[in-house]
Image (cartoon, grey):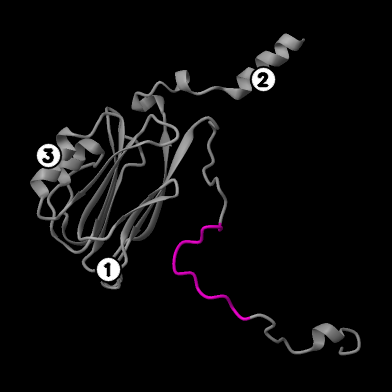
Amino acid sequence: MAKAYPRYYRKPSALKSMPSMLKGLCQGCGTRQVVFTSDPHISYLPVQFRSPSQAEIQRGDASVISINGTDFPLRSVGVLLLIVDACSVPFRLTEKKIFSFTDVSRMEEYLKTSIPPRSVVLLSTRGQIKQFNISDSLVPLGLAKPANLYNKGSTIFLGFNGNFKPSWTKLYTSPARQGLGLLEQFIPLQLDEYGCHRADTIRRRDLELLKQTSKAH
């Protein structure tokens, strides 16, 4: 065996040391496009939530909402709220708000009266939630029914302000002292169901090529 396979008969040895473990997200991993759709003309907005546990918060980790690779961190205890225009490509952030857990009435008023129509609503919390009764205000934004938001570790909400309820609207919660880790969602933009006039703003390259071919013949 040694004569036939001299190289592979030797005992294995580590030629290179193992690289250090990544502490954050791998920026060069995976593919750029992971959404498969029958309509290639729909644009998707990649959204990530990083929700730390109580132990991670004590180490100083922030709660982060990432939109198309742009991070919006929350380092204080409270609520981070981002409002995105659902009809704009590339994405347009229309509002960024931070609320404390004690300022529930002001946040409810904002959710009910200040979010523009056809808007994507992204909400993430940081810190332990003893009492956070805003679920009634989330129902018009896509929540199926009021939820119990008492004694939670983290809350994440994806909503939409409009006459249409998208399938991607969701509420996530974790038990006390626990986080939700990393959550990822691809949100379609400029849909006709949102009330966007997508046909007036998107150029169909395939139709343009077809017209040019027809004229050539």
Q: Which of marks 3 and 1 is nearer the N terminus?
A: 1
Helix, strand or loop for the magenta stretch, by majority:
loop
Q: How far apart are marks 3 and 2 (CA)?
A: 50 Å
Which segment is the magenta one?
Answer: 17-29
First reached walking from the N terminus: tag 3 or tag 2? 3
48 is higher (above) or lower (below) than 37: below
Q: Residue at x 36, y 33 (%)?
A: 86
Q: Residue 34 location in percent, x, y?
A: 53, 47
Q: What residue type is labelled 3?
A: Glu
Q: Mark 3 points at which residue?
A: 109
User: Vertical placement of 71 versus 83: above or below?
Assistant: below
User: Secondary structure under badge 1?
Assistant: helix
71 or 1, nearer to the observer: 71
Which element type, helix, strand or loop, lies under badge 2?
A: helix
Q: Where does label 1 land, which residue?
A: 57
Q: Nearer the viewer, residue 134 or 55?
A: 55
First in sequence, mark 2 or 1: give its number: 1
Instruction: Identify which residue is drawn at 10% across, 50% down.
Output: 103
